[in-house]
């Protein structure tokens, strides 16, 4: 018996020894290639970080970091001034105002889809939100510019219809699908045993949702809201077309503002390659990149926390 | 006295119950109204776009070049340009993204590296489109020397749609049952042979829907091509990948904001926006219909 086993072993050994290192390579080649291509998204991210930072840093040979966060943005004046604060304020104002509408509506729609709507209504509401998500941002911008802006101009008798309010309204429509679909994911991820236990105790469906499902999904819902916020801050075309683009610090929604994204898009085409102004625009890009990444990672963390909690 | 004979308590509970019921009705109808507002908004957008845009649309509108400083004529070059950019982006992104998805679903063992890649995919999906435009300008246009061209625009858009194709391909690959792979491996096939002949063919329809979604996203994006590919006006179609192109979304943007004749071209603008909207929504709708059919026809 033992001799027999050894014989098999020997045969096996001979076989593996015979197979050359080339065939070993061939057997491993696919794994190697896919391992490299598998990390393509990390490579792309690396490219983004490297080049945006590389083009941004020369600004700070000329200008102090403190003055980059100053209030005046006059890159073509003499002497020029590269203060990004007005655009940061513009982005913040428009985003906050947009979320004030998009969060309650988006979360309500998510709750409606996940917990309330019967079969066909659920499908209809879901596909409406998917269609809204698919509309290109330039079409939203055009809609805002051609129809919403004139409407707001006459309603509030303004000198221009392109204001922070116009941008906020369009942005709230654009952030809605992100918030609603991610929030719906969070609500449906709550184990049904939670609901069943609550219903068995005699709670109504509303009480179950309000006191059990929503608290259990809270981290996920928060993640959805933060991701929606990241989307709103990063949105370019629609805001560029309707926000009015004057770099001023204001808390009034009826005045034109300029956001970080619009600032880059407006001036990038006109500035000479390699000028200080050019580097300043990339610095705005760095700022934008860091803000949106921080939001994305926070949101991922919250969403991950919910998954870990309920599914161990 | 036994509780279920206590008339007072019963009526009190009934009253309380009906109050709780009516709270539920109010709350649920509130949620319904909120969802309805999404429908109303969508309806308004579609109504105005179709009502205003259909005035401009004719056969000539999609087959002619713009005339008289873009105040008349059609959008043919922008349509062709968008087609080149969308097709180029997907040609670049598709092989990379599908390979990445194959690695994630077939080869990689779960661990910190896979988690990092997944975070990477999500992060890439969250990068603002204007930042892709900056990267495209700094890297493809300047460092690689493509110039402002179809090629630079297609590569930039390719990076943008990578996460979309990776996610839907991975989902399609994962939906192929384990048994398929085990059967093939048990017959002595290598892993690569299994992936190539068993897993990929089974997942292909799902992977292709991801590619279509990628095209629709690439066609609709403006910010990434503003400084990498798009031209205000071209008298001819691009002859080589190193030429600039007109593109539908950029055409809408410049006509509505930067064109000197922007009031007298209202109809043309609405027409162009409607064409783009129709194109993108048709692609998306096609994917939805195709996916439902796939799910129904699936034999496993």
Image: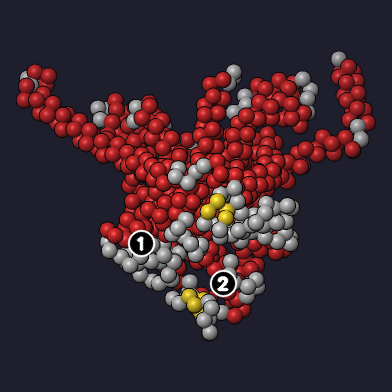
Which residue bears the numbered disc 2?
Answer: A280
Query: Quadrant where the C terminus of chain B lies?
Result: top right
Residue depicted at x 71% and y 25%: B198
Say what secondary structure mark 2 lies in. Answer: helix
Query: Quadrant where the N terminus of chain B lies?
Result: top left
Residue depicted at x 47% and y 46%: B56
Render colour scheme: secondary structure
Residue depicted at x 41% and y 30%: A123
Which residue bears the numbered disc 1?
Answer: A161
Numbered circle sitting on residue A244: none
Foreground: B178 or A151? A151
Q: Residue furthest top?
A: A1
Choose top left, top right, bottom left or bottom right for residue B231.
bottom right
Foreground: B22 or A307? B22
Residue A1 visible in the snapshot? yes
Camera-side mark, 2 or 1? 1
């Amino acid at each position: 018996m033992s001799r027999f086993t050894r014989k098999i072993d020997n045969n096996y050994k001979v076989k593996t020894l015979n197979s050359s290192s080339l065939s070993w390579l061939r057997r491993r080649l696919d794994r190697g290639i896919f391992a490299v291509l598998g990390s393509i998204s990390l490579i792309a991210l690396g490219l983004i970080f490297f080049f945006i930072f590389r083009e941004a840093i020369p600004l700070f040979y000329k200008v102090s970091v403190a003055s980059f966060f100053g209030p005046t943005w006059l890159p073509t004046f003499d002497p020029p001034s590269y203060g990004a604060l007005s655009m940061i304020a513009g982005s913040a104002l428009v985003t906050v105002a947009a979320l004030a509408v998009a969060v309650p509506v988006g979360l309500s729609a998510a709750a409606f889809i996940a917990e309330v709507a019967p079969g066909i209504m659920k499908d209809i509401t879901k596909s409406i939100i998917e269609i809204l998500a698919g509309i290109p941002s330039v079409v939203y911008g055009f809609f805002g510019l051609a129809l919403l802006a004139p409407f707001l101009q006459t309603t509030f008798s303004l000198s221009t219809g392109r204001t922070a309010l116009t941008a906020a309204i369009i942005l709230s429509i654009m952030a809605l699908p992100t918030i609603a679909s991610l929030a719906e994911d969070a609500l449906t991820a709550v184990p049904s045993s939670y609901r069943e236990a609550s219903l068995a105790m005699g709670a109504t469906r509303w009480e179950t949702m309000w006191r059990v499902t929503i608290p259990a999904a809270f981290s996920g819902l928060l993640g959805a809201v933060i991701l929606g916020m990241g989307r709103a801050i990063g949105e370019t075309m629609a805001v560029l077309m309707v926000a009015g683009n004057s770099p001023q610090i204001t808390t009034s929604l009826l005045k034109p503002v300029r956001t970080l994204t619009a600032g880059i898009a407006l001036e990038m085409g006109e500035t000479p390659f390699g000028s200080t102004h050019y580097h300043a625009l990339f610095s705005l890009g760095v700022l934008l990149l860091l803000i949106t990444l921080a939001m994305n990672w926070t949101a991922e963390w919250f969403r991950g926390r919910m998954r870990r909690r309920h599914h161990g | 006295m036994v509780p279920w004979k206590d008339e007072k308590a019963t009526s009190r509970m009934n009253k309380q119950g009906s109050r709780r019921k009516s709270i539920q009705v109010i709350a649920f109808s509130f949620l319904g109204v909120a969802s309805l507002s999404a429908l109303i908004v969508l309806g308004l957008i579609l109504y105005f776009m179709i009502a205003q845009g259909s005035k401009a649309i004719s056969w000539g509108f999609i087959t002619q070049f713009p005339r008289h400083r873009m105040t008349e004529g059609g959008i043919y070059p922008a349509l062709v340009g968008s087609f080149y950019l969308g097709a180029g982006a997907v040609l670049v992104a598709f092989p990379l993204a599908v390979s990445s998805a194959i690695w994630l679903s077939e080869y990689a063992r779960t661990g910190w590296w896979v988690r990092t890649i997944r975070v990477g995919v999500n992060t890439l999906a969250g990068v603002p489109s204007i930042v892709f435009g900056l990267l495209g300008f700094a890297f493809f246009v300047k460092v690689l020397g493509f110039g402002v061209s179809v090629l630079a625009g297609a590569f930039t858009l390719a990076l943008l749609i990578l996460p979309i194709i990776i996610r839907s391909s991975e989902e399609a690959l994962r939906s192929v049952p384990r048994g398929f792979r085990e059967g093939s491996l048990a017959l002595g096939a290598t892993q690569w042979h299994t992936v190539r002949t068993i897993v990929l063919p089974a997942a292909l329809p799902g992977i292709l829907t991801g590619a279509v979604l990628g095209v629709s996203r690439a066609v609709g994006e403006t910010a990434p091509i503003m400084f990498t590919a798009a031209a205000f006006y071209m008298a001819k179609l691009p002859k080589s990948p190193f030429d600039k192109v007109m593109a539908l979304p950029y055409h809408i943007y410049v006509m509505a904001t930067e064109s000197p004749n922007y009031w007298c071209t209202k109809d043309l603008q609405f027409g162009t926006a409607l064409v783009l909207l129709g194109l993108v929504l048709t692609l998306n709708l096609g994917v939805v219909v195709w996916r439902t059919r796939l799910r129904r026809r699936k034999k496993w």
